[in-house]
Image (cartoon, coloured by chain):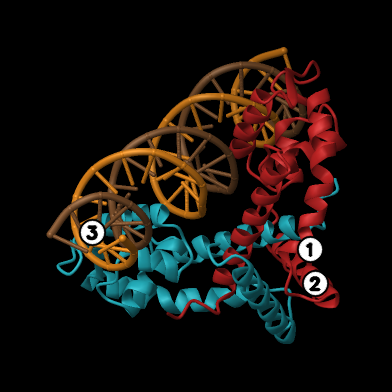
Chain colours: A red, B cyan, C orange, D brown
DNA sequence: CAAAAAAGGTATGTATACATATTTTTTTAT
DNA sequence: ATAAAAAAATATGTATACATACCTTTTTTG
């Protein structure tokens, strides 16, 4: 087993843990949202009437995935979708009242669970970790803006 | 947008970058392996005749996912699967000659791309990052051995 | 302005990723 | 030794995740 100490393996495990903490805490709070769905709600809330391609860019996903995510948010009545009058290719997505409610309910839970993900690190270590992560992401975006 | 600085979001982006670098470099090298498939080959190579549940535990996946991964490795002729004589529930998985070859071809590529993922960090920062990641994973495994 | 390029969305296909249920087989407990 | 519990696979269902192709609409360009 040569892979245990590799960056790729460790990062995948971190993401696995992060996702697990997220779903556990949301479930406990009685909130039916995945982390992508929450991120999408967050983007839509910031820019009401946003189109799907912009949501995808903002939260770093591809259009196809976001299409499916918005489908499910629409099914749950958290967002509404309508064809834009300015650009008939685009769908304008907006939070419903239920969407605002679930977002307000979820936000404190989501904020609280962030430190839980990094449990095991001290405050200063957490800060350093997040800084290294940010730097890594920036470096890779510079190299490959499409990724 | 409240999510940009959150641990969960940054970790997902890291994983996205990591996966992207992995597939790009493997593709360039003419190797048809995903990161999970490589991890599985690595585990099988370490313990020839290993069963799927043990593979899953070693590389931190669930059995259902690994079942599909082994299916695809078998289709590509990189592994062989047979019912264990000691335990007829279990499938003994072993690398084929082609599997050994592709592993040998892939390993240097995989090793080389690890630092590329963390480009943007200095050597000492890379080391610190990997240490923080390891610590985080350990802390979460202690809290939740099943995760 | 008409052809070409680009952009938004959807469709399709592949590969995770994991929860839950089911089947088969083995192990444990009485 | 037998019923019960546990374990290994597989099956099923849901949700990413992303590449590629396609359709429609808009923008750009000659």
Classify residue B19 as left or right of residue A142. Answer: left
- Residue B33, numbered circle: none
Q: Identify which residue is drawn at 67% across, 77% down.
A: B135
Q: Are marks 2 and 3 on the same chain?
A: no
- Residue A115, numbered circle: 1
Closest to the camera, between mark 1 and mark 3, is: 3
Q: Where, quadrant-wise, is the C terminus of chain B in this rendering?
A: bottom right
Secondary structure type for disc 1:
helix
Residue position for label 2: A126
The quarter of the picture where residue A96 lies is top right
Q: Identify which residue is drawn at 64% across, 24% down.
A: A75
| Chain of residue at mark 1 | A
Give the spatial CA distance, label 2 vs label 3. Answer: 44 Å
Secondary structure type for disc 3:
loop
Closest to the camera, between mark 2 and mark 3, is: 3
Residue A116, position as x, y percentages in the image: 75, 62
Residue A111, position as x, y percentages in the image: 82, 53
| Chain of residue at mark 2 | A
Of label 1 and label 2, which has the lower sequence position? 1
Closest to the camera, between mark 1 and mark 2, is: 1
Residue position for label 3: B89
């Amino acid at each position: 087993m040569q892979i245990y100490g590799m960056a790729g393996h460790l990062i995948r495990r971190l993401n696995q843990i992060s996702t697990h903490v997220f779903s556990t805490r949301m479930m406990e709070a009685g909130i039916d949202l995945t982390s992508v769905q929450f991120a999408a709600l967050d983007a839509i809330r910031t820019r009401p009437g946003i189109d799907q391609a912009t949501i995808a860019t903002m939260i770093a996903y591809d259009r196809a995935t976001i299409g499916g995510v918005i489908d499910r948010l629409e099914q749950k009545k958290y967002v509404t979708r309508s064809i834009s009058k300015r650009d008939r290719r685009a769908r304008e997505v907006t939070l419903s009242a239920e969407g605002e409610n679930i977002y307000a309910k979820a936000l404190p839970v989501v904020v609280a669970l962030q430190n839980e993900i990094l449990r095991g690190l001290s405050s200063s270590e957490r800060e350093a970790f997040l800084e290294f992560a940010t730097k890594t992401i920036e470096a890779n975006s510079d190299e490959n803006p499409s990724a």
